[in-house]
Amino acid sequence: MKPKVEIYDTTLRDGSQGEGINFSVADKLRIAERIDAFGIHYIEGGWPGSNPKDIEFFAEARKRKFKNAKLAAFGSTRRKGTPVDKDEQVRLLLEAETPVVTIFGKTWLLHVTEILKTTPNENIDMISETIRYLKDNGKFVIYDAEHGFDGFKDDAEYALATWRAAEKAGADIVVLCDTNGGCLPQDIKRITQAARTELRCQLGIHTHDDIGLGVANALAALEVGANHVQGTINGYGERTGNCNLTSAIPNIALKMGLSCVPEKSIAQLKDLSQFVDEIANIRHNPRQPWVGASAFAHKGGMHVNAVQKVARSFEHIEPTAVGNSRRVLISDLAGRSNIVLKAQELGFKIENDTPELKSILAKIKELEHAGFEFEAAEGSLALLIRKILKKKEAPFTVEAYHVSMRHNGGGSVCEATVKVKVGEELSHTVAEGDGPVNALDSALREALVKFYPHLKKVTLTDYKVRILDTDTGTGAKTRVLIESTDGKDDWGTVGCDANIIEASLQALTDSMEYALLRKK
């Protein structure tokens, strides 16, 4: 069955134009395969007329079979004064051998006269002749009306003339583009309605997010007759990005009730979002709507209490619908419900009437007041809860440590000495490092692996320092947050002290202790 709304992904072309995004050919192929498996209808692979990498991508993509998506090559109308069959970039579009070719053309007279330096009639001929030539060569043609909305505002009749020309030449879909990303939803609706009245072909929408309305504008176009949405995974794109498909897709499917991708795929949305971020080497944005780690995170005690009773009281959907999960945050704003839900999330058997609950809450608030923060330090939080609930001693203690720095030739070397007690045994180790924290980490790890060999797998992946009371200058209290991994899971731990080395040791010690707790 034909979907009510088609999704066109341009992550590999428009998304790659975003600052800090750089895909290799192998990256593009992996992303294309994942997007195809998700059930998106079109994948725009790149512009073969712009760079050798995209030519290579299409050569490799031809060797693969896509189950759901049609691959599209992207380019422009022929150049002014050049016959379409002599235009080099049009030739490369055909040589990409994709079933779909998407071309853009000018709608806005400003661009026709000042950018292309041509006449309004010549621009219409460029649109018509290119589309007709591609159709004659057996291609499914999507026409992107660049600056469609700005062009319509400037001269509605000329804009309509370019769109009519595209349809008459055989364009299968005419896509209206808010290329500058500056339109409001009412502009999108009004102009899309005008296009829908004039055109009989399928109508699409391509929006940018320059004023934060990329997704809203795409949805507005759907309300008045468009049924083809172009965008990128995670909203990658030039300037502030494109319409974010990880927001558009669930809004279309779960809020508007329109079919767009296979129903079973919606629950894989967060995984898709994280996968593309990983390939792009971009840190996943926790505040992304729908798929971010904070999308269903609850902090205020009253909110958490309500969610504990009726989840939908503070959640617009069930998080698992998009592959996400509910999170409870712990801070000085926490109430009893926060602690109960978070402790259960961490694997502890605790209820609202557990006697130790009051002590746990009091200790957390005391530490938060002292400068600790547990929102991103679930490892430290789990250890705190465990100590109060089970009254168990730590598996090891740091009896003493020393950190020093000495000059060695043209540089300096940091050295750390750590004395660790496990049961009745002592381990005294010395290690060097690139800095005091690195040396301390190495010495602590070396001391513990004698007793707990599996700690060799634990590595530090991130280290953050926050100065808390800046008015005291270099004597300020410091909060250290570290992230660790064992290759499978990640966790955070925290330390806080006026001495940055002491704060770092607290976080490092918690990291190792939590790794042991997880092992058990």
Image: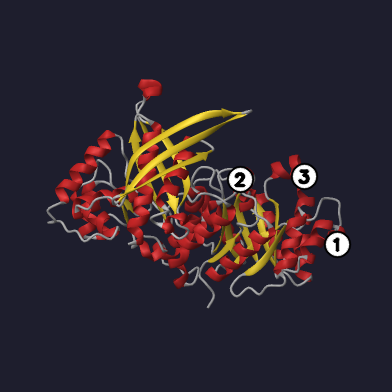
- Relative depth, front residue between 221 and 100: 100
Q: Where is residue 72 in the image (x, y as percent from the top left)?
A: 68, 64
Name the outermost residue toward the bottom.
1
Q: Which amino acid does label 2 sit on?
A: Gly
Circle 2/circle 1 CB separation < 8 Å: no
Mark 3 or 1, nearer chain start = 1
Q: Position of residue 375 (x, y in %)?
A: 33, 46
Mark 2 or 1, nearer chain start = 2
Q: From the viewer's perspective, is the residue at label 2 or at label 3 nearer?
A: 2
Mark 2 highlights which residue?
20
Q: What residue type is labelled 1?
A: Asp
Per the rendering, the mark at residue 85 is 1
Q: From the viewer's perspective, is the residue at label 2 or at label 1 nearer?
A: 2
Q: Which amino acid does label 3 sit on?
A: Leu
- Relative depth, front residue between 256 and 426: 426
How far apart are the alpha carbons under marks 2 and 3? 29 Å
How far apart are the alpha carbons under marks 3 and 1? 20 Å
Residue shown at 52%/54% (left/top)? Answer: 234
Rate crowding at label 3 as few (under 14), some (14 to 19) or many (20 or more) other CA atoms within 10 Å.
some
**Quarter of the image where one finds residue 400:** top left
Q: Position of residue 396 (x, y in %)?
A: 32, 49
Q: Report helix, strand or loop for mark 3.
A: loop
Q: Report helix, strand or loop for mark 2.
A: loop
Q: Report helix, strand or loop for mark 1.
A: helix
Per the rendering, the mark at residue 321 is none
Q: Where is residue 133 in the image (x, y as percent from the top left)?
A: 79, 65
How far apart are the alpha carbons under marks 2 and 1? 36 Å
For residue 224, say whether it is visible.
Answer: no
- Relative depth, front residue between 284 and 212: 284
Mark 3 highlights which residue?
116
**Left or right: 227, with 421 as reference point:** right
